[in-house]
């Protein structure tokens, strides 16, 4: 019995030392601050195999707004910690850098490891309390949207900057508008040179509201967006001889298959109204003027008349968003 007593006494005296040894070897998780990083890709950007073969990259840098929320699919009234809207610059290498004021602090992930949700739009815009951004179109600017992605501070779940870059989630920008590229040529090899002063798309609506949660724009306002060709918008000559002249582009609201755009063309030989955009291929016309699609429209001109020679789908090769072409809030 005395031997058993000494055994228990030794065991209890050794237990605190055992706990102390365990506590020195095992540490509790520490809440650390991890700055947010993003990268960019998507169908609206160009593909390159030089630097990032798995991403589409911009041909030129452009500004955007990244909006952060702690609530999935909800960007209204963003005022909680870690939430907010921030202007960024998207570089030609697909990098995304913060445009911070001197007193601003780079956004960080929630220190608890909770999910953070992000969407982005370009050009940069300030969202309203309902989670929408609004613009006034002039026909010169592109409009891009990157749908929601989520990330947290833990390695492998971050938006960008994971040790395994294959786990990164780039902002996938896509076009919200359709593009019309206008060209013209004389129908005959003789006659007179004709100057085109303006091309108006009669049904194009200039006011656009984009819900950040869906990226599905709605359009309103007084219809009509106009291209003024030539340097300074003074017009452009279409010479005799059959040379095709580039007039310029308009970026417009997309259309559903049951609607169409008509054109008013002001020229030195008169104004031609309500010219329909007619697709020669019926199959192609079912998907006409959709977001991210680009079409080349060529006018043919005689000394007294004007019509549409062809409407051809073309690749959308450029990102036309930069500091010189800004939407009007």
Image (spheres, helix red, strand yellow):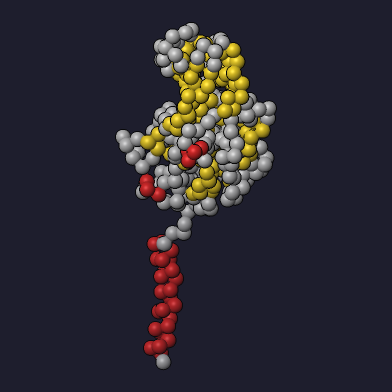
Q: Position of residue 284 (x, y in %)?
A: 48, 38
Quadrant of res 265: top right
On screen, residue 108 versus residue 127, left or right, reads left
Q: Of 267 and 320, which appears nearest the observer?
A: 267
Q: Quadrant of the N terminus?
A: bottom left
Quadrant of res 61: top left
- In percent of the image, x 40 and y 84: which residue is there? 6
The single residue placed furthest to the bottom in the displayed view is 1
Q: Of 186 and 234, which appears nearest the observer?
A: 186
- Does 98 sit above or below residue 77? above
Q: Of 243 and 9, which appears nearest the observer?
A: 243
Q: Of 68 and 124, which appears nearest the observer?
A: 124
Q: Position of residue 209 (x, y in %)?
A: 63, 36
Q: How many marks?
A: 0
The single residue placed furthest to the top in the displayed view is 192
Quadrant of res 228: top right
- In percent of the image, x 44 and y 29: which residue is there? 318
Q: Quadrant of the C terminus?
A: top right
Confirm whether residue 123 shows in the render.
no
Confirm whether residue 53 shows in the render.
yes
- In percent of the image, x 42 and y 83: which residue is there? 8
Q: Position of residue 293 (x, y in %)?
A: 48, 35
Q: Position of residue 188 (x, y in %)?
A: 44, 14
- In percent of the image, x 44 and y 39: which residue is there? 43
- Does 69 sit above or below residue 249? below
- Does 255 sit above or below residue 234? below
């Amino acid at each position: 019995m005395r031997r058993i007593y000494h055994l228990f006494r030794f065991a209890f005296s050794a237990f605190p030392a055992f706990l102390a040894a365990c506590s020195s070897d095992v540490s509790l998780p520490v809440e650390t601050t991890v700055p947010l990083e993003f990268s960019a890709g998507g169908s609206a950007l160009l593909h390159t195999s030089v630097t990032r073969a798995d991403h589409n990259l911009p041909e030129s840098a452009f500004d955007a707004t990244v909006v952060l929320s702690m609530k999935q699919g909800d960007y209204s009234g963003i005022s909680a910690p870690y939430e907010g809207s921030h202007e960024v610059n998207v570089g030609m290498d697909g990098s995304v850098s913060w445009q911070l004021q001197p007193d601003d602090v780079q956004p960080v992930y929630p220190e608890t490891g909770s999910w953070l949700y992000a969407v982005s739009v370009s050009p940069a815009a300030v969202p309203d309390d309902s989670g929408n951004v609004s613009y006034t179109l002039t026909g010169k600017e592109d409009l891009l949207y990157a749908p929601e992605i989520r990330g947290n501070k833990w390695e492998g779940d971050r938006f960008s900057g994971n040790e395994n870059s294959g786990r990164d989630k780039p902002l996938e920008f896509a076009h919200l508008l359709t593009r019309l590229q206008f060209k013209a040529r004389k129908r005959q090899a003789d006659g007179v040179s004709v100057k085109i002063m303006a091309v108006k798309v009669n049904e194009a609506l200039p006011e656009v509201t984009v819900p950040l949660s869906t990226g599905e724009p709605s359009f309103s306002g007084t219809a009509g967006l106009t291209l003024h060709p030539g340097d300074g918008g003074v017009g452009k000559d279409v010479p005799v001889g059959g040379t095709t002249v580039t007039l310029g582009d308009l970026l417009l609201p997309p259309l559903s298959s049951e609607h169409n755009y008509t054109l008013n063309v002001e020229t030195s030989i008169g104004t031609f109204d309500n010219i329909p955009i007619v697709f020669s291929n019926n199959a192609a016309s079912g998907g006409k003027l959709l977001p991210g699609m680009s079409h080349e429209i060529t006018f043919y001109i005689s000394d007294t008349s004007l019509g549409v020679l062809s409407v051809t789908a073309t690749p959308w090769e450029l990102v036309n968003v930069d500091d010189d072409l800004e939407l009007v809030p």
